[in-house]
Image (cartoon, helix red, strand yellow):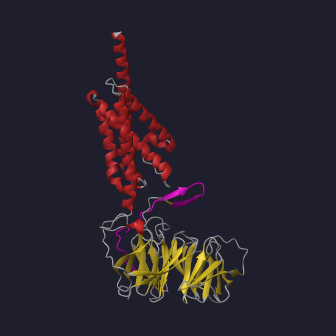
Amino acid sequence: MNSRKILYGLGIEGLIKSIAYVFALLFIYAATSKLLDFETFTVQLAQSPLLSAYAGIVAWLVPGIEILIAGILVFPRFRNLALYAAFTLMVMFTAYIYIILNFSDFIPCSCGGVLEKLSWTEHLIFNVVFIVLGAVAILVSTNGYWKKKLILLASLCVLGIGIVTLLFVFSEKKMQRNNAFQRRYMPHPIEIVHSLDLEYSSYYFAGIGNGNVYLGNTTAPLLMTVIDSSFTVATATMIQLDQMDLPYRAVQIRVVPPTFYVVDGTVPIILQGTTANWLAKTKMEGDYYFNHIYAIDSSTIAVKSHSSETMENIIGIIEIGSHIKGNFSDKLLEKQIDGIFDTDGKLIYNDSLRRIIHTYTFRNEYLIIDEDLGLDFRGKTIDTVSTAQVHIEEDISRNQKKLGSNTVLINNSTATAGKYLFINSPRLGKLEPDDMLDEASIIDVYDLTDQSYSFSFYLYSYKRSKVREFRISNGILYALQGNYLVAYSMNTKFFK
């Protein structure tokens, strides 16, 4: 009987030792793979939507912990403690993969060696097997207390999953925060005066002028809705085109009263008409492709297009007259990565200064450009990100590239009026409360005459909807917020 107990005990000890050594080999191999190609490992962590904000720390911490646990597993005296640590670490790795697979648009790679050949689903199964092995080794150890061990293992599962979840949440928040700058907020710079329920959130600003707000609609591309500035009269009209049978894919409407344009840069075509009858005739067809436009006046359009040679973004002006004339410059937008995503931005026009303004989406810079495409100056926003932090991923099924989820957005929608540039920033500065971005949009104001930051203000959510797009005209800030068009009066004490 005693000999059976001894043999049983030796078998259990052998099992525990075998599992411990397998864990040790796994951790040593994984840590060595990471350290041998440390630069790649760090870059992959920086691309992770869960760990990008902590990539520098985690890149050293993970292989360090793996080596430490592997070392402790070798010593019988500390083996039980090391098995608990190994179990918890595998739970954290598994939680990380689960979140990546189910809550991330971008699926990175952060493993080295043979493990990199596994798919993420296979890696998940691999980790679960090791979690089970760790639990078995702990549960069959000779000191008993099954109930306590199960409770402790369950607690470690909750702890491991909780840590990874918190990393995910706080990494997302950290990506929206930059303590390197501090804003100046002015009290009550705007006050709501009107609101109108549009019923749908598919409207966009086509133009403002002559006491009216002109709205296009992405789901009804030729529908033009005209709302007077007091929000008391609204009319809807279907625009008629002289060519209705073209393969339109990205129709946009731009209004500079009394002129309006219907454009589609993918066809490419520009049609023009007047607001008196909303009939549009073809003015340009096939001359220039473009992906973004801003109507300057009744004969001039500012556009962003792609260079036919490099396919990188360029800025141009198209003049609509008896002859179509296009003037493009590849000297304005400065390439940092690919010349496409990294130079993306908003193109607007300031009537008072007669200047085109391009605000980069992914870096702290805006350009002031004259009507001959000469650069006046490069202005800086108060954010400190001067190099675009974009991650570009391949969509193999569509054979195209798109932005990954950990791309850092610096400047959102923009507007201009008088001497001011208004930028909706999605980033928190120093001493700003974390929950403010849930309650309001931050608008930073810049003085274009001396290239300086003036102040900031909150544009609070309306009916729980944040601003999607905004325009400014005659001292009124018009904002599209969810289904609503909202008008705010601007305090002349701050806006001169």
Residue 327's spot in the image, x, y percent? 55, 82
In the drawing, does residue 167 fall left or right of residue 345? left
Please state if 422 lies on the left or on the right of 483 as rendered.
left
State the extent of the magenta-drawn residues as a range.
377-402
Instruction: Name the side, left or right, on which 271 lies relative to 53.
Output: right
Farthest right residue in view = 245
Residue 243: which quarter of the image? bottom right
Q: Nearer the viewer, residue 109 or 229?
A: 229
Camera sees residue 115: yes
Q: Is residue 387 visible?
A: no
Instruction: Please name whichever residue, 425 or 269, is drawn nearer the observer in this view of the structure.
Output: 425
* Position of the N terminus by quadrant: top left
Location of the C terminus by quadrant is bottom left
Q: Position of residue 221 (x, y in %)?
A: 64, 74
User: Residue 210: within the magenta?
Assistant: no
- 462 relative to 258, above or below: above
Residue 42's spot in the image, x, y percent?
37, 52
Q: How many marks?
A: 0
Does residue 338 sit above or below 297 in this rendering?
above
Find residue 116 and report its horizontal and vertical position in percent.
Answer: 46, 43
Residue at the spot 60% in from the left edge and 77% down from the top edge: 216
Q: Residue furthest left?
A: 77
Residue drawn 38% across and 60% down?
A: 173
For residue 437, what is the image quadrant? bottom left
